[in-house]
Amino acid sequence: VSDGRGFADALAAQLRERGAEVTLTAPGSLHAALGAGSGVDHVVHCAALGGADGPGDFHTTFASAQETGLHHVAALVRLLGARRKPCRLLVVTDGAVTVESTDRVIPEKAPLIGALPVFQQEYPHLRCSVIDVPRTESVASGALVAAVVAELFAEEPALVTAHRGSWRYLRDFSRIRCSDGESILRAQGVYLVTGGLGRVGLLIAEFLARHC
């Protein structure tokens, strides 16, 4: 899915050099590219690249970022999900995560990062991940494009990766053991769970009912 900045074109050129069959499509032409009989098994979404990061109206910039990012990827996921065929989806962003102190970050792109795990849970036959690249004018550099190609064909792709220079960063979570001190939960306590009728709320309510 093209970006209008040349990154998708450079990516397509490298993939063709590897012998891959590549189709470039505009963000508004997904139905034609992924219609019945389509043999596509790898999709790279580049349309979220770019966007304003200077002073401006927040509501306008936020809406624009969702249109090219979260909303467009969600529509793409629905199309891929309806095919019920295994597929690899790699979303390329710039400025969506903070890694180094000099990063130019666009907070409006954060919803896309948060939604990807949900997409993968809803459609288990999709392998979704995001790679964040530096927000620079030379976004289509050969090194960055090669990094995206490597990420696309990784045997065990990470959900979120970021490339800065020659470094590849992975997002990871570490388990923290709580202290053995006094519990904040009280026996026979009364607790209010907001949003308690959702799946997470019901799980929390069940835990409290069993242990308090």
Image (cartoon, rainbow, N blue to C red):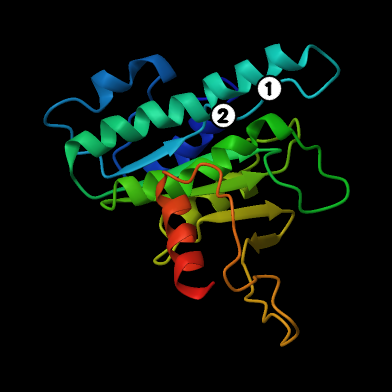
Q: Quadrant of the C terminus?
A: bottom right
Residue at the spot 82% in from the left edge and 53% down from the top edge: 100
Secondary structure under tag 1 reads loop
**Label 2 close to label 1 by CB (< 8 Å):** yes
Q: Quadrant of residue 78?
A: top left
Can the viewer see residue 100 in this picture?
yes
Q: Position of residue 41 (x, y in %)?
A: 26, 45
Q: Quadrant of residue 133?
A: top right
> In the image shown, does 29 or 73 lie closer to the viewer?
73
Furthest residue toward front: 188
Q: Amino acid at mark 2?
A: Ala
Report, in whole angstroms, how far the alpha carbon at label 2 lies from the one at label 1.
8 Å
Q: Which mark is residue 48?
A: 2
Q: Position of residue 199 (x, y in %)?
A: 40, 50
Q: What residue is shown with label 1?
A: 51
Q: Is residue 134 left or right of residue 2?
A: right
Q: Position of residue 79 (x, y in %)?
A: 27, 30
Q: Amino acid at mark 1?
A: Gly
> In the image shown, does 142 or 167 lie closer to the viewer?
167
Residue at the spot 82% in from the left edge and 44% down from the top edge: 103
Can the viewer see residue 1 in this picture?
no
> In the image shown, does 42 or 68 lie closer to the viewer?
68
